[in-house]
């Protein structure tokens, strides 16, 4: 039952509002623009002792608050009547099911929260006990005597899963482990997907304190196939992550959890910071020159959707595509494009004669100009572009210093993007060989370690 509500109430976000847990600043800013343009947004509530508890539309309410606008003036406020708190949880989950399906731990917890109320129990362990008993009865009915309580609980389960995309048997088989990380980890070790040493690293107290359960599972998936040393070093690097405050980022090397060995491989920590600054969970990130898959792995860790392309895919999950032909249609209106193009003349022996790096300098610049135009058409309005390039002294061909970041940033400005930051991401001096150092000393040259990350927004 629902209806319109009068204005003699105050609002609060309901404790059962699942979507509000996915706070998204960029989404709020978009809602503000829609409100100022005259849009009337939906706010769904229920009444609780004279307070309107918002079960859906929490972001719209916060956007209106920040604009200083009365929700009754610029929103469609609807009051719902729920029989039980369990009904409120179910309503919120179904309203946000697409987002929840990308976060299985949160989805599982929502189901458990509802089942606790339906069963009338107080803990997750009691819910697990009931589900496992009913599962065993379903699988081996001849071994169990079904009680009246069992029959009642089956009725509750059927009620909960009636509108879910998964049946309760599959839920018990696949989702219970999401609430028991050590057990889930042990099962990966038993299957041979991880070594016992890797399992110990992933179950250490410090990791549990810093990363939530959803994130730890994604880390476990990333370390499959990695050595124990790479797992240890990669996890330690993850634990060192802090939100960036300055526009100079220094890294001693690549986090081994991100990407595979590949010429021009960049530290995944660069992508990690870019995603932290410019995207939210569930956003679509596109990397048209994905190389060893660094961007794809970082997106997996941070729960972003990634479309990774390359002219010569080196691993699974990267789609064969030449960005010189533009972006695929499925990439249109993405939230961020990460660009780490092959630099002119560098590593051309590896990439081959057909690669961008093998082009003449003038043709390489032409490629970058075309890339800027197609990128600006692909990223959504309000979305971002990150461009990583290295300036260097070209002694062999042109005989001059080529400030590629400065030159190419103009192409992206001409394509209609707005530059918002230029970050220095220097390479470690260890990448230079002894021969490079001796040559530089002999000829009084400076070796190139500069690398710039330029970020843009499509307004």
Image (cartoon, rainbow, N blue to C red):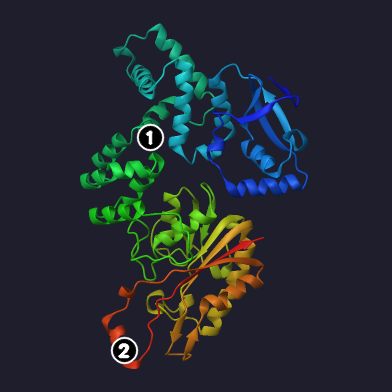
Q: Is residue 318 visible?
A: no
SS class of the residue under badge 1? helix
- Residue at x-position 55% and y-position 58%: 336
- Separation (CA) of disc 2 from disc 1: 57 Å
* Extreme residue in the left direction: 196
Residue 247's spot in the image, x, y percent? 49, 65
Image vertical order of residue 108 relative to residue 80, above or below: below
Considering depth in this image, is 50 or 145 the residue closer to the camera? 50
Considering depth in this image, is 236 or 282 the residue closer to the camera? 236
Residue 105's spot in the image, x, y percent? 43, 36
Q: Is residue 89 visible?
A: yes
Residue 1's spot in the image, x, y percent? 68, 19
Image vertical order of residue 298 relative to residue 35, above or below: below
| Residue 388 relative to residue 262: left or right | right
| Residue 393 relative to residue 278: left or right | left
State the residue position of label 2: 441
Image quadrant assignment for residue 112: top left
Q: Which mark is residue 346?
A: none
Q: Earlier in the sequence, mark 2 or mark 1?
A: 1
State the residue position of label 1: 178
Disc 2 packing (10 Å; few <14; some 14–19; many ≥20) = few
Disc 1 packing (10 Å; few <14; some 14–19; many ≥20) = some
């Amino acid at each position: 039952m629902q209806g319109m509500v009068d204005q003699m109430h105050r609002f609060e976000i309901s404790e059962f509002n699942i979507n509000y847990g996915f706070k998204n600043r960029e989404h709020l800013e978009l809602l503000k623009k829609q409100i100022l343009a005259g849009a009337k947004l939906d706010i769904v509530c229920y009444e609780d002792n004279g307070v309107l508890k918002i079960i859906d539309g929490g972001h719209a309410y916060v956007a209106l608050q920040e604009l200083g606008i009365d929700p009754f003036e610029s929103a469609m406020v609807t009051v719902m009547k729920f029989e039980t708190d369990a009904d409120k949880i179910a309503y919120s989950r179904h309203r946000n099911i697409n987002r929840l399906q990308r976060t299985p731990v949160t989805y599982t917890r929502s189901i458990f929260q509802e089942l606790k109320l339906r069963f009338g129990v107080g803990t997750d362990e009691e819910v697990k006990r009931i589900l496992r008993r009913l599962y065993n009865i379903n699988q081996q009915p001849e071994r169990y005597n079904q009680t009246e309580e069992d029959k009642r609980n089956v009725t509750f389960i059927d009620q909960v899963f009636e509108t879910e995309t998964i049946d309760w048997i599959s839920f018990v088989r696949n989702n219970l482990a999401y609430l028991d990380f050590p057990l889930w980890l042990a099962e990966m070790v038993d299957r041979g997907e991880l070594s016992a040493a890797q399992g110990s690293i992933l179950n250490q107290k410090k990791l549990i304190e810093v990363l939530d359960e959803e994130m730890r599972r994604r880390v476990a998936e990333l370390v499959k196939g990695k050595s124990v040393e790479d797992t240890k070093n990669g996890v330690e690097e993850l634990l060192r992550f802090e939100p960036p405050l300055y526009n100079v980022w220094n890294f001693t090397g690549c986090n081994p959890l991100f990407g595979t060995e590949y010429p021009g491989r960049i530290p995944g920590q660069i992508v990690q910071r870019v995603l932290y600054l410019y995207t939210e969970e569930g956003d679509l990130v596109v990397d048209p020159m994905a190389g060893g898959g660094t961007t794809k792995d970082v997106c997996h860790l941070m729960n972003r959707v990634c479309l990774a392309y390359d002219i010569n895919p080196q691993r699974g999950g990267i789609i064969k595509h030449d960005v010189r032909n533009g972006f695929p249609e499925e990439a249109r209106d993405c939230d961020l494009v990460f660009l780490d193009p092959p630099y002119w003349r560098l590593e051309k022996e590896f990439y081959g004669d057909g690669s961008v790096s093998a082009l003449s300098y003038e043709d390489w610049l032409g490629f970058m100009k075309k890339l800027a135009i197609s990128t600006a058409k692909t990223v959504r309005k309000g979305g971002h572009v990150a461009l990583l390039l290295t300036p260097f002294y070209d002694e062999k061909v042109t005989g001059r210093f080529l400030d590629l970041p400065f030159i190419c940033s103009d192409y992206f400005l001409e394509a209609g993007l707005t530059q918002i930051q230029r970050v220095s991401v220097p390479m470690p001096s260890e990448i230079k060989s002894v021969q490079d150092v001796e040559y530089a000393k002999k000829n009084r040259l400076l070796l190139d370690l500069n690398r710039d990350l330029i970020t843009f927004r499509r307004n």
